[in-house]
Image (cartoon, helix red, strand yellow):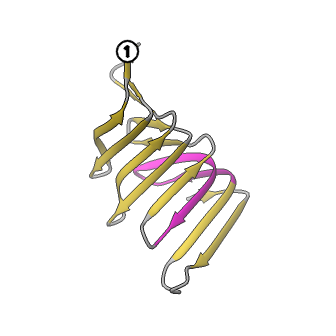
């Protein structure tokens, strides 16, 4: 499911691939992930979704944020996500503790739509 104030779909120059843009108050939902942002762009040619302005992505038990997020798909499943500028990933450890990772540039890798590895530039870790 996808919701936005404005949705635009166009074919690229080859007339084979669709490019979709969603503007203002974007929300989307799939069984394996959901998210929200102000603007979103999906390019079918490279299977990449780009999220702009306060994006939040929930993938299973993880919450991913940044100033800009790119999500790369392979075979219809999330392959990796790049979080730019102020990336932050949070996951609940138990009823009282959370795992939190912050950096400047972060790439999360997914297997079977589950986050299994994070590569980052500069970190600070904290548990609450």
Give the residue at x 32% y 50%: 113
* Image quarter hosting the C terminus: top left
- Secondary structure beneath dot 1 equals strand
In screen coordinates, is 74 left or right of 14? left
* Image quarter hosting the N terminus: bottom right
In screen coordinates, is 42 left or right of 75? right
Give the residue at x 63% y 44%: 53
Give the residue at x 40% y 48%: 81
The part of the image, by quadrant, that contains residue 125 is top left
Residue 76: image x %, image y %? Answer: 36, 64
Q: Within 10 angstroms of label 1, few (less than 14), some, or many (20 or more) residues?
A: few
Residue 97: image x %, image y %? Answer: 37, 16
Give the residue at x 45% y 61%: 48
State the residue position of label 1. 127
Residue 83 higher or lower than 112, as above or below: above
Residue 106: image x %, image y %? Answer: 39, 39
The stretch of residues the image draws in magenta is 24-44
């Amino acid at each position: 499911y996808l919701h936005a104030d404005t949705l635009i779909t166009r074919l690229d120059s080859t007339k084979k691939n669709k490019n979709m843009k969603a503007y203002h108050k974007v929300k989307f939902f799939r069984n394996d992930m959901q998210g929200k942002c102000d603007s979103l762009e999906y390019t079918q040619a490279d299977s990449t979704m780009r999220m702009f302005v306060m994006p939040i992505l929930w993938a299973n038990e993880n919450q991913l944020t940044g100033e800009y997020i790119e999500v790369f798909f392979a075979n219809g499943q999330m392959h990796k996500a790049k979080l730019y500028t102020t990336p932050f990933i949070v996951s609940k450890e138990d009823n009282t503790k959370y795992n939190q990772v912050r950096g400047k540039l972060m790439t999360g890798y997914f297997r079977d739509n589950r986050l299994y590895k994070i590569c980052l530039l500069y970190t600070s870790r904290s548990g609450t």
